[in-house]
Image (spheres, coloured by chain):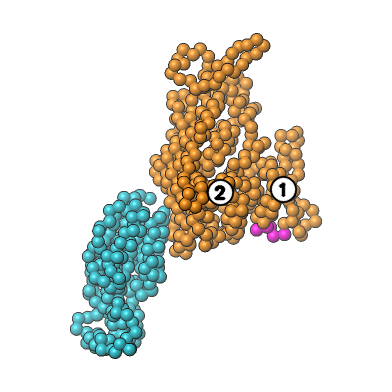
């Protein structure tokens, strides 16, 4: 059976949320709300939840927000075995001092399971807790063997070895302990670049890097999903014929990275996609991510960036249709009235199950969502009612 | 000038023009807009969406009590309850209701004609006709003397027939109700108008707002 979509989401203690409660989620959700209420953090919460608390995902979102640096050249402690100069307190509500406290956050996703009258709501919970982790090591002849890894408790007051900061990650019944004894361990967690996570695709506000998009492209090239990307690009560039990636990955010597070339009807020679402007590139990132998100989540931060308002309606129509065909649940944030108008026009006639606009609101970290279904959005646009 | 944060929701075109002209006759500052919603259900739908607007400060709702004031009251109450207004009076208030809720828009409710009797906008407007107006008495006599074959309208629309018959026989025949206020065929100081304007003032013109945004 296909995995059903989230119908509700509760977040406790994560980032700016002391408590976030969202109900009545749709397949495609456009999220609005004032700055600093946590629109981007909501997308991050869904991505961590979808990745079942993967430490690599947690690492990536810290890196992407510039909250930790994984640049080996600037990190003198790289091989000293110390985790100093690196912290992840920003993951937790109120940024507590991790030397003093053991904060945790949890994310509860709600699904409907079953058919027709036989349905019931299922809650899946991810809990991530900061703790001190002890590695019990046996010195054996010819080497050291990790015997056990456990959370330090009060009974360890006499423990002579060293405890390192780390995370206890519990998803459902399963618990994992991740020790950050060596920052190198954190750095080496399998990178998203080499392992695009199947559970979700995240398009940040500044767009996706070309190398990353090329990896997603490899997943969909020559498949039916490829057509979604062409359909999207032709919203802006009508006579675009084909896309190909050229170049070698950026980590190779003297490499400029992989980048997209496009063949356009009126030109004999291919041109770099990035030469067509920011809007086309953002759209390309969104379309490739959508195409690669089958049976998962598509998370788009500031979906309107660089996209002309005249294209918004068609872009939403594409997302609304393809998300259904590919069984993708979409969460996108925006500040733009044109984006809301385009969404309304494309969602007109659809049900609350298919599409809704959600405004985050609240104070002091206690946030809830106010939802508008397509029928109500119609009135919002017609009467110019402010919903942002 | 209006930013859509203060709005008076009314059913139709006639309502809109009657209130515009009443406010003008009384120099009521236009700090709110008068929005027509097409029908009674249109008003309730609009109310439900505006209650979720991010800048909404005050909403006035005017509905005809053409079935019964109590029935109307219940349907408005249902919408408000859905949006976390727990303390709503059990029945319509004779001077017009104002419902307050911390952090939420201020809500005013007026049921035509006077919150108590069954009726509609036209009943409210009939009361603006000067006392002992001979033409109005004559119009009524004609209507009441009609044979059943000619009387095509339903009983609930009696006041509608009366006011429009009367308006049809003015110096400028067929003047709409709103314009009839401006042309002074109707007296904007009579009937339920004083109570109505006080209600408008309580909804929109009271100092300070209880909206947190």
Check the image and name the residue furthest to the top.
Answer: A141
Chain of the residue displaying label 2: A
The answer to whether any part of residue B163 appears in the image is: no
Q: Residue at x 53, y 14 (%)?
A: A161
- Magenta stretch containing residue A188, yes or no? no
Crowd rating for badge 2 (residues with CA inside 10 Å; few <14, some 14–19, many 20+): many
The disc, 2 or 1, on the residue closer to the chain's N-terminal end is 1
* Chain shown in cyan: B
For the magenta stretch, what is the residue range?
A234-239
Of helix, strand and loop, which one carries label 2?
strand
Judge by depth and name the residue closer to the eye, B172 or B66: B66
The numbered disc on residue A327 is none
- Identify residue for label 1: A221
Q: Residue furthest right?
A: A268
Residue B187, percent from left and from top? 25, 77
Q: In the rendered image of this protein, does residue A202 appear above or below residue B34?
A: above
Chain A, chosen colour in render: orange
Taking B166 as reference, is A90 above or below it?
above
The image position of residue B210, as x and y in percent, is 31, 52
Q: Quadrant of residue A16?
A: top left
């Amino acid at each position: 059976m296909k995995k059903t979509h989230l119908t509700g989401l509760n977040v406790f203690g994560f980032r700016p949320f002391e408590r976030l409660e969202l109900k009545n989620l749709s397949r495609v959700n456009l999220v609005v709300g004032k700055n600093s209420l946590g629109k981007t953090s909501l997308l991050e919460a869904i991505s961590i939840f979808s990745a079942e608390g993967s430490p690599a995902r947690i690492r990536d979102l810290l890196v992407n927000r510039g909250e930790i640096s994984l640049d080996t050249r600037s990190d003198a402690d790289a091989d000293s075995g110390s985790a100093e100069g690196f912290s992840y307190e920003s993951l937790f509500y109120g940024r507590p001092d991790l030397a003093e406290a053991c904060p945790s956050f949890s994310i509860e996703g709600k699904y409907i399971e079953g058919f027709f009258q036989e349905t019931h709501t299922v809650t899946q919970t991810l809990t991530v807790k900061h703790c001190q982790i002890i590695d019990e090591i046996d010195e054996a002849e010819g080497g050291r063997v990790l015997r056990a890894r456990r959370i330090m408790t009060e009974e360890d007051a006499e423990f002579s070895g060293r405890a390192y900061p780390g995370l206890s990650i519990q998803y459902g019944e399963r618990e994992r302990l991740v020790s950050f004894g060596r920052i190198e361990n954190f750095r080496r967690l399998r990178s998203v670049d080499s392992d695009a996570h199947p559970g979700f695709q995240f398009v940040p506000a500044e767009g996706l890097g070309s190398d990353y998009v090329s990896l997603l492209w490899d997943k969909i090239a020559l498949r039916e999903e490829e057509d979604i990307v062409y359909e999207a690009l032709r919203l802006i560039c009508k006579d675009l014929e084909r896309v190909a990636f050229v170049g070698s990955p950026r980590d190779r010597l003297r490499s400029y990275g992989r980048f997209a070339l496009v063949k356009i009807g009126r030109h004999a020679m291919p041109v770099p996609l990035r030469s067509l402007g920011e809007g086309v590139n953002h759209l390309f990132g969104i379309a490739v991510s959508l195409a690669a998100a089958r049976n998962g989540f598509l998370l788009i931060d500031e979906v309107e960036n660089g996209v002309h308002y005249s294209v918004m309606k068609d872009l939403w129509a594409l997302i609304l249709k393809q998300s259904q065909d590919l069984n993708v649940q979409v969460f996108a944030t925006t500040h733009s009235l044109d984006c809301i108008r385009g969404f309304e026009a494309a969602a007109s006639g659809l049900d609350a199950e298919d599409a809704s606009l959600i405004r985050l609101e609240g104070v002091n970290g206690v946030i809830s969502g106010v939802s508008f279904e397509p029928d109500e959005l119609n009135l919002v646009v017609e009467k110019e009612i402010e919903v942002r | 000038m209006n930013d859509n944060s203060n709005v008076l929701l009314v059913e139709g075109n006639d309502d809109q023009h009657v209130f515009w002209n009443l406010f003008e006759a009384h120099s009521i500052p236009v700090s709110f807009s008068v929005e027509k919603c097409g029908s009674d259900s249109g008003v309730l739908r609009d109310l439900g969406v505006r209650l979720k607007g991010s800048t909404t400060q005050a909403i006035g709702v005017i509905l005809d009590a053409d079935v019964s004031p109590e029935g109307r009251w219940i349907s408005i109450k249902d919408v408000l309850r859905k949006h976390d207004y727990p303390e709503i009076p059990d029945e319509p208030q004779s001077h017009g209701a104002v419902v307050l809720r911390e952090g939420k828009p201020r809500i005013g409710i007026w049921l035509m004609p006077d919150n108590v009797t069954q009726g509609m906008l036209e009943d409210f407007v009939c009361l603006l006709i000067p006392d002992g107006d001979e033409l109005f008495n004559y119009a009524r006599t004609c209507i009441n003397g009609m044979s059943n074959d000619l009387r095509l309208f339903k009983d609930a629309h009696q006041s509608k027939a009366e006011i429009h018959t009367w308006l049809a026989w003015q110096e400028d025949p067929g003047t709409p109700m709103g314009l009839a206020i401006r042309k002074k065929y109707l007296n904007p100081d009579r009937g339920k108008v004083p109570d109505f304007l006080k209600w408008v003032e309580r909804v929109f013109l009271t100092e300070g707002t209880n909206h947190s945004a």
